[in-house]
Amino acid sequence: MCLAVPGKIVSVTGGDDPLSRMAKVSFGGVIKEVSLAYVPEAGVGDYVIVHVGFALNKLDEQDALKVLEDLKTLGDMEDGQQRLQE
Amino acid sequence: MKYVDEYRDAEASQRLLGAIRATVTRPWTIMEICGGQTHAIVKFGLDELLPDTITLVHGPGCPVCVTAAETVDEAIELAGRPDVTFCSFGDMLRVPGSRLDLLSVKAAGGDVRIVYSPMDAVTLARRHPERQVVFFAVGFETTAPANAMAAYQAKREELRNFSLLVSHVLVPPAIEAILSSPANQVQGFLAAGHVCTVMGYTEYEPIAQSYGVPIVVTGFEPVDILQGLYMCVRQLETGRAEVENQYSRVVSREGNLPAQRIMREVFEIVDRNWRGIGVIPRSGFALRAEYRDFDAERRFALSPAPALTASPCIAGQVLQGVKRPHDCPAFGTACTPERPLGAPMVSSEGACAAYYRHRRSRPRA
């Protein structure tokens, strides 16, 4: 039930009512119709987390990259710590 | 797939495991309360890769598993009615009630439909005004925005033939129930990343503070879980008890405000009976008075009768992290996904199903 997947917005439809805004979202090539009612600021090209047909948030590219960057320095830190212990 | 593959990277996982090993000096018991995390841990063998000093416990993070047997019986009763089209998420179909499950009602001719989204049920109601369409609204806070929108739209459109059988559960009260149990051994928590995508994590701050436990909002891929564990262990080793956010690429502190607004409009907080655990005060959602017309229990005048639950199933203890699936005498023998005795063996997020799929043989002591 927690299972939500990141997908890329390919196109957006929907009129004035933000609650009826829908998008075609690509999950590695598989396209599904998703409601953007809860992520009014999301647009074409954005990645969103989708759960049971609703986008729940935009993926923050900066934060995503930062996590991966932090992990790269983790190894160096650990080597440093090991050298200290020797 | 972007934003998925990077978080399954083996090298990053090894770095994190190394960092955890270098940091741990004492035994710690950490619980995750999310079926998605349970499955990732068992599937990728993360608990076996961790140092022995860390005990990972699976909590009641499977909403299908904690849906009260009485509610499953109500669903079965509704699904059996000739005028009802009963819609549900797939994994509720084989959850045993007192005697039957929804799948056997379907096999006997009941109009039971698996849907991907609650909005699919609304669409069915629009297209078939002659049918009473009922949606089984089960889930944690992650699913509540979708279920709320279904009720919200149905009310706006004045749909006369749509209703919801609601059985929502909330995570923070479950954490408090576990922490306030005298038998509690859990010292830190991984909070469910997608629940927090919706709700934010402000609710966890008073819990971390009053019980003195670190709580780390964590994602679902192996790298996420290992990083969440690393952050938790670092806090435990330095005596800190704060809420941290590992899943920052998706989760913000306040959560999704438009979703919370619709949820508040449609739902109110009520006491809820968690299958295998008992009633946890203020731990569930029910439809507000303004939405009572869309409440299936009211529309069909259902009164929950106590369910018959005599069986070797120890789901309650598994869900509270007190026992593991292998501790159950029926695991893999009398109880399998094809013939489940309890919900955790049925649900795609249940601990027993995870162990059955990925870890059939008994682990070394």
Image (cartoon, coloured by chain):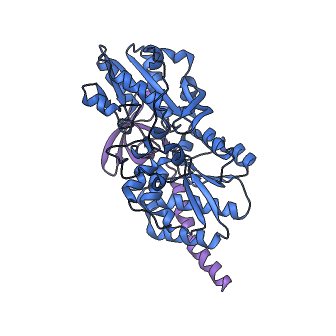
Q: Position of residue B160 (x, y in %)?
A: 39, 13
Q: Is residue B344 placed above or below B257 in the rendered structure? A: below
In-front residue for pair B288/B363: B363
Q: Quadrant of the N terminus of chain B?
A: bottom left
What residue do we see at 39% from left, 62% from top?
B361
Q: Splitting the image into 4 quarters, where does residue A44 fall?
A: top left
Which chain is depicted purple? Answer: A
Find chain B in the image and tell me its colour. blue
In-front residue for pair A39/B160: B160
Q: Position of residue B287 (x, y in %)?
A: 53, 22
What residue do we see at 62% from left, 74% from top?
A77
Q: Position of residue B337 (x, y in %)?
A: 35, 46
Q: Is residue B181 placed above or below B358 in the rendered structure? A: above
Q: Splitting the image into 4 quarters, where does residue A74 fall?
A: bottom right
**How many numbered circles does the render carry?**
0
Instruction: Report the residue that reaches farthest toward the bottom.
Output: A86
Does residue B23 appear left or right of residue B74 in this picture? Answer: right
What residue do we see at 60% from left, 75% from top?
A78
Answer yes or no: is residue B191 visible.
yes
Does residue A40 appear left or right of residue B127 in this picture? Answer: right
In-front residue for pair B90/A5: B90
